[in-house]
Image (cartoon, grey):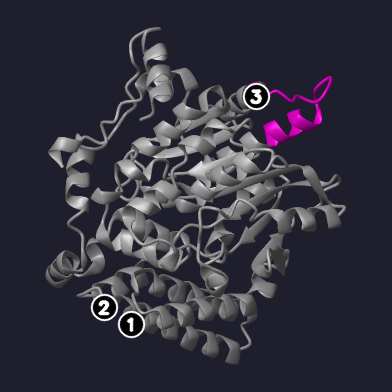
């Protein structure tokens, strides 16, 4: 924790008793064990109990992709060591492709395309725990091509495109809302280490319903942009192609472009907001804030994935942690930021979300899911509905819709966003959101309480490691 942040925490703590954010009592113990989760340990656990023992948040991610629960369970049950992971999920993908061919023969168009989409998602899951770069590339290519073939029938409102970036192009999709009388605001989704743009299609419903257009991008080194990589912390210009697109489209509003990212994509979203003044705001889900304080305690499997993503440009964990630290970037931000934190995150320490919100001060807003896991995959309807309402309120205030004049002060905009969030979380009538979209246990935490409550209780002290 920096001296400035420590001073801010002390300042707010002196104003009254500290507010204790609900946290998982086993978090310190979980993080003591995280560093032991290497291939050897995971193979032992899988051999005894199969891959059914994966964290609930990881299983929730697969269900959020639309893979039926029974098929997820059957596939995981066949995995008895890490090396089985890719083969098992590729076999499941082939099963879905067999179903696609049967459905296509029966002229069941939409059902056939849904089977093809599920095959694409299975190839996507297959690459998560793979070590062979060639097979990873092939699985990612299968994901993008199968999904692209199914997309016109399943998502007719989506448009496949390529966005210029530096000397290359980034593959993307543009999703447009229905019946937008005025130019629509734009939500840009940035993916994390193992996430691809095809997976995030199921995250867009609340934004489209709120009237936003959505741009889904594969960041360099990920998904279909594997060969455009490697992934880097200096990709603060990643949205240049998005703004070119927005300025070319009269039905899109360049004044209301926001960025949303989960995990390492959330880290990237904060970086983009810190350096790109054209952005309205950012939403980040369980982001890494200060990797230097915890990276050496993280799972070796996670570190292996991240180092593979960034390529040969980074030689060790210490350099990686330094490159992706957000303390300096967060200090330069003058725009509203919505942070979603999860109390049971075992990939990124829960305290990272709290640290980021505290560093942002009154511009930051923390929504805390005490029982949530990394990525909040089991709560996608909640956090997308809440962030859509937050972005809508901020965007309208920024252009002066419903106000005497445009609101330009970032702290005032953030407070307007918090009022919209509070209304969503305590609404008597769920409309315009579906009832299941409201996170009734997600707690909106006022910025001063975040700072007062900021205690690093999610990790053991350094001398206990």
User: Is residue 446 among the parts visible in the rendering?
Assistant: no
Q: Name the residue under label 3.
A: 416
Q: Residues within 10 Å of mark 3 (few under 14, many from 20)?
A: some
Q: In which quarter of the image is residue 194?
A: bottom left
Residue range corresponding to the magenta coloring: 392-411
Q: Do the residues labelled 2 and 1 touch (CB within 8 Å)?
A: yes
Query: Is 258 left, or right, of 361 in this rendering?
Result: right
Q: Is residue 432 magenta?
A: no
- Residue in the picture at 65% in, 53% down: 237
- Residue in the picture at 83% in, 22% down: 405
Q: Is residue 275 above or below residue 428?
A: below
Q: Name the residue under label 1.
A: 87
Q: Residues within 10 Å of mark 1 (few under 14, many from 20)?
A: some
Q: In which quarter of the image is residue 113?
A: bottom right
From the image, state whether disc 3 or disc 2 is nearer to you.
2
State the residue lying farthest toward the bottom: 105
Q: How far apart are marks 3 and 2 (CA)?
A: 50 Å
Find numbered disc 2 in the image and state the secondary structure of the residue it sits on: loop
Q: How crowded is mark 2: few (under 14 residues within 10 Å), some or many (20 or more)?
A: some
User: Is residue 107 among the parts visible in the rendering?
Assistant: yes
Find numbered disc 3 in the image and state the secondary structure of the residue it sits on: helix
Q: Name the residue under label 2.
A: 83
Q: Which of marks 3 and 2 is nearer the N terminus?
A: 2
Q: In which quarter of the image is the C terminus?
A: top left
Question: Residue 270 location in percent, x, y?
Answer: 55, 42
Q: Earlier in the sequence, mark 3 or mark 1?
A: 1
Q: Distance between the residues labelled 2 and 1?
A: 8 Å
Q: In this view, does 215 lie above or below 15?
A: below
State the residue lying farthest toward the top: 15
Question: Residue 182 location in percent, x, y?
Answer: 85, 44
């Amino acid at each position: 924790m920096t001296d400035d942040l420590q001073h801010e925490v002390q300042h707010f703590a002196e104003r009254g008793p500290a507010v204790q954010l609900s946290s998982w009592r086993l978090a310190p113990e979980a993080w003591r064990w995280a560093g032991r989760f290497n291939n050897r340990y995971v193979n032992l656990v899988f051999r005894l109990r199969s891959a059914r023992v994966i964290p609930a948040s990881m299983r929730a991610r697969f269900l959020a992709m639309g893979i039926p629960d029974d098929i997820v369970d059957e596939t995981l049950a066949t995995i008895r060591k890490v090396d089985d992971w890719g083969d098992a999920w590729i076999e499941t993908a082939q099963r879905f492709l067999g179903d696609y061919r049967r459905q296509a023969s029966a002229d069941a168009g939409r059902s056939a395309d849904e089977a093809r989409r599920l095959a694409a998602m299975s190839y996507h899951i297959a690459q998560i725990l793979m070590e062979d770069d060639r097979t990873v590339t092939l699985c990612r290519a299968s994901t993008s091509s199968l999904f692209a073939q199914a997309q016109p029938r399943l998502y007719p409102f989506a448009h496949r495109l390529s966005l210029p970036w530096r000397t290359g192009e980034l593959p993307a999709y543009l999703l447009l809302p229905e019946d937008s009388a005025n130019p629509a605001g734009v939500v840009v989704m940035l993916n994390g280490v193992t996430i691809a743009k095809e997976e995030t299609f199921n995250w867009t419903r609340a934004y489209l319903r709120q009237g936003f257009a959505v741009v889904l991008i594969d960041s360099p080194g990920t998904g279909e942009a594997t060969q455009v990589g490697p992934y880097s912390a200096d990709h603060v210009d990643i949205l240049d192609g998005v703004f070119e697109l927005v300025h070319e489209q009269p039905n899109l509003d360049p004044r209301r472009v926001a960025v949303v990212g989960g995990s390492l994509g959330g880290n990237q979203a904060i970086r983009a907001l810190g350096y790109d003044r054209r952005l309205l705001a950012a939403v980040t889900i369980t982001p890494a804030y200060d990797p230097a304080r915890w990276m050496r305690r993280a799972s070796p499997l996670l570190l292996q994935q991240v180092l593979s993503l960034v390529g040969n440009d980074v030689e060790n964990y210490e350099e990686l942690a330094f490159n992706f630290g957000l303390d300096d970037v967060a200090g330069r931000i003058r725009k509203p930021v919505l942070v979603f934190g999860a109390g049971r995150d075992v990939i990124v320490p829960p305290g990272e979300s709290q640290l980021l919100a505290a560093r942002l001060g009154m511009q930051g807003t923390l929504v805390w899911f005490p029982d949530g896991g990394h990525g909040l995959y089991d709560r996608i309807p909640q956090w997308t509905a809440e962030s859509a309402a937050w972005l809508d309120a901020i965007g309208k205030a920024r252009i002066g819709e419903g106000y005497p004049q445009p609101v330009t002060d970032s702290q005032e905009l953030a407070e307007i966003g918090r009022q919209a969030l509070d209304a969503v979380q305590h609404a008597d009538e769920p409309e315009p959101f579906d009832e299941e979209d409201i996170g009734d246990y997600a707690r909106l935490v006022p910025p001063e309480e975040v700072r007062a409550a900021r205690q690093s209780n999610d990790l053991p002290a350094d001398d206990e490691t």
